[in-house]
Amino acid sequence: MESTPALDSEGKAIVRVLAVVLERLVSANSHLAQSDQGQVTKFHALRAPAIGVGQYLERIQKYASCSNECFILALIYIDRLIQRNNFLLTELNVHRVVITAILLAAKFFDDAYYNNAYYAKVGGVLVSEMNSLEVEFLFRINFSLRVMPDVFEK
């Protein structure tokens, strides 16, 4: 699908909204994470990346060339991850969760998408780690990638 100024503008707006939602969620969880680290998962980094969530999403949007719908699907997938696993999204795991959710959304929804090695490079993780994160995410959401239109429209 060819990019148009209207689609580009819509995509930037979607990314900004997604960034705000994720940043607020991470911020709300920060006091919980201080008292209870919760379960450490494959998504956890040793320290928070220097790049903020907003900039990270803009980077993914710029280089991954996935559809605008992928960013909405990624948010739905992240919600499923949180709800089904009592997953606490923090500054230590949000970046890896985001790149994995977008990778899965692109593979499931878009006709053309890049391979895991490319997404790993865009996301700043090793290819082996990207592969592992993809499998972990899929199992945690019980391979539930299909999103009904009424859920998508919410």
Image (cartoon, helix red, strand yellow):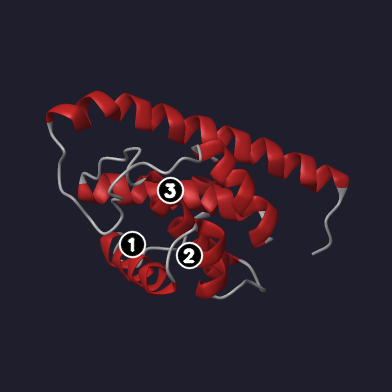
User: Which residue carries the number 1 mark?
Assistant: 137
Q: Residue at coordinates 56% horizontally, 76% vertically from top-left?
A: 115
Residue 131 lies in quadrant: bottom left
- In whole angstroms, how far apart are the C-alphas of marks 1 and 2? 9 Å
Query: Which callout, 1 or 2, points at the residue further toward the start of the chain?
Result: 2
Crowding at label 1, few (<14), some or many (≥20) Cα neighbours within 10 Å?
A: many
Q: Give the left or right position of residue 18, taking residue 98 as reference.
A: right
Q: Is residue 45 above or below residue 138?
A: above
Q: Residue at coordinates 16% horizontally, 38% vertically from top-left?
A: 37
Q: Which kind of residue does numbered mark 3 sit on?
A: His
Task: Residue 23 in the image: state x and y as whole percent.
Answer: 45, 31
User: Which residue carries the number 3 mark?
Assistant: 95
Residue 79 lies in quadrant: top left
Q: Residue at coordinates 48% horizontally, 32% vertically from top-left?
A: 21
Outermost residue, right direction? 5
Q: Residue at coordinates 25% horizontally, 50% vertically from top-left?
A: 84
Crowding at label 3, few (<14), some or many (≥20) Cα neighbours within 10 Å?
A: many
Task: Residue 66 in the image: state x and y as whole percent.
Answer: 65, 60
Q: Is residue 119 above or below residue 70?
A: below
Report if residue 115 is visible in the image. yes
Crowding at label 2, few (<14), some or many (≥20) Cα neighbours within 10 Å?
A: many
User: Which residue carries the number 2 mark?
Assistant: 104
Q: Give the left or right position of residue 107, taking residue 26 as reference.
A: right
Seen from the viewer's position, the closer of residues 144 and 16 is 16
Which numbered disc, 2 or 3, marks the residue closer to the eye?
3
Secondary-structure class at tag 3? helix
Q: Which kind of residue does numbered mark 2 sit on?
A: Leu
Q: Give the left or right position of residue 80, taking residue 57 as reference.
A: left
Q: Quadrant of the N terminus?
A: bottom right
- In whole angstroms, how far apart are the C-alphas of marks 3 and 1? 13 Å
